[in-house]
Amino acid sequence: MAASSRAQVLDLYRAMLRESKHFSAYNYRTYAVRRIRDAFRENKNVKDPVEIQALVNKAKRDLGIIRRQVHIGQMYLTDKIIIENQEKPRT
Amino acid sequence: MLLRTAWRRVAAAVRVAPGPKSVAPTRGLRLRAVDLFPQSAVPSDTATAPQAESMLRPLYMDVQATTPLDPRVLDAMLPYLVNYYGNPHSRTHAYGWESEAAMEHARQQVASLIGADPREIIFTSGATESNNIAIKELEAAIQPDTSLVSVMTVNNEIGVKQPIAEIGRICSSRKVYFHTDAAQAVGKIPLDVNDMKIDLMSISGHKIYGPKGVGAIYIRRRPRVRVEALQSGGGQERGMRSGTVPTPLVVGLGAACEVAQQEMEYDHKWISKLAERLTQKIMKSLPDVVMNGDPEHHYPGCINLSFAYVEGESLLMALKDVALSSGSACTSASLEPSYVLRAIGTDEDLAHSSIRFGIGRFTTEEEVDYTVEKCIHHVKRLREMSPLWEMVQDGIDLKSIKWTQH
């Protein structure tokens, strides 16, 4: 199994961010985007390929969680919270 | 209590007035947001002008009362609410075995967070039940001089951290059992039952982004701590707590503990940053604000502030766009000032002016800024209306006034 390349990690990062922006709950959406950015930034200097693969695998599992939970949130919509009008609209 | 009657009135008004079309049936309470965002309002001559007011939910700043489920927790629970519905105590088929495996995995996750052995974790319906089990031990004690010390790890009203390791050391040397209610502390500050010499610990699911209705009690095995069961029945949980263990809930508790263990440092950094932002901004803009609780030994996510010359309930009602509390939820029905504030020697009038701001994993900088802005605005407004404030501005010492009886 080939080790995860830089391109694959970046693809995963983009996919996770893209998916997270679809959380309908403000607090989940903002947390996911922030956490993903910080986690990838924190691990950007990891060199050990075994460790990189472990992190990538965990990220793939987390992407699955995000997808499912985004979907569930969209099935149980409620009103936005008061602060959302002040935000840029997200797709 | 005043707040709840006000909410009922708002809810009744909302039901009566025709609201804007919504996509899905909404069951929550909403607020009218009329003048809040004039810059986004449509020009008044369009047909949508009467619909410009929208229904919006308040910000959530009351994490000490309860926390939202972390999406990772719900994800872990759902399979056990859909397909894996077996009774974990059924020994004869796969449904039982898979449910039991999930329960034991969750037990390991909880134990790992507090440095315990999984055999020392008993699942309960929450920290309240765990507290009752622990304290009942006192009554079940055989020796006349056995006693129990019970202390909250982190206080839910003012966020003060008790010196648990110190207390543990003292109790251990005096052969006294040590119980701590760690509901507000588990997963937020590092806890180790062996380092801190804790004999009994209560854990609550819904304070750590897990589900409501579940908790655990840690009961030390070495040296053995004997407890008496509160509820008897089929002998589940080593006979200490009969009743079918609710697999979906304990899976949620386990997942919440695992996530907490991974995120503890990151969450602490974030929450500290936001707490500093909130207190600094408020203290900088308003005089006569007191933070309740020892600032040295304090969990940052629970900020209790007293705004002098402002009545706490009035401020809470004014801050209707933000979900806040003026004390512990468990005593919120009464109008008595907080026993915690009274115990730390807060003046009666300051105790009535206290508000608790809760900052958690999902709180944003924008929510903090909004809350601070509204808080400052309303405190200033309420103080303008206060005759006591006027007297203070004129230099009168309120303590020197002799109030006459009528």
Image: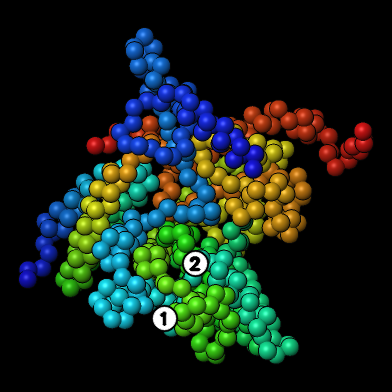
Q: Residue at x 77, y 29 (%)?
A: B387
* Residue B170 makes an appearance in the image: no
Q: Position of residue B350 (x, y in %)?
A: 72, 46
Q: Secondary structure at mark 1?
A: helix
Does residue A42 appear left or right of residue B229 in this picture?
left
For the residues bearing labels 2 and 1, Cβ distance under 8 angstroms: no
- Residue B23, placed above or below residue B206: above
Quadrant in which the C terminus of chain B appears: top right
Residue under the point 46% across and 79% down: B234
* Camera sees residue B57: yes
Q: Nearer the viewer, mark 2 or mark 1?
A: 2
Disc on res. B125: 2
| Residue B260 or residue B17, whichever sits in front | B17
**Depicted B245 relative to depicted B34: above or below:** below
Tell me where residue B37 appears, x and y as whole percent.
43, 25
Foreground of the two, B391 or B158: B158
State which quadrant residue A62 falls in. bottom left
Q: Amino acid at mark 1?
A: Pro
Res B119 quadrant in image? bottom left
> Residue tagged by mark 1?
B118
- Look at the picture and state if B214 lies above or below B64: below
Quadrant containing the N terminus of chain B in the rendered view: top right
Query: Which of marks 1 and 2 precedes in the sequence?
Result: 1
Colour basis: rainbow
Q: At label 2, which amino acid type do we have? A: Ser
Q: Position of residue A58 (x, y in %)?
A: 23, 65
Label 1 Cα crowd, 10 Å radius (few <14 / some 14-19 / many 20+): some
Disc 1 sits on a residue from what chain? B
Q: Residue at x 25, y 57 (%)?
A: A65
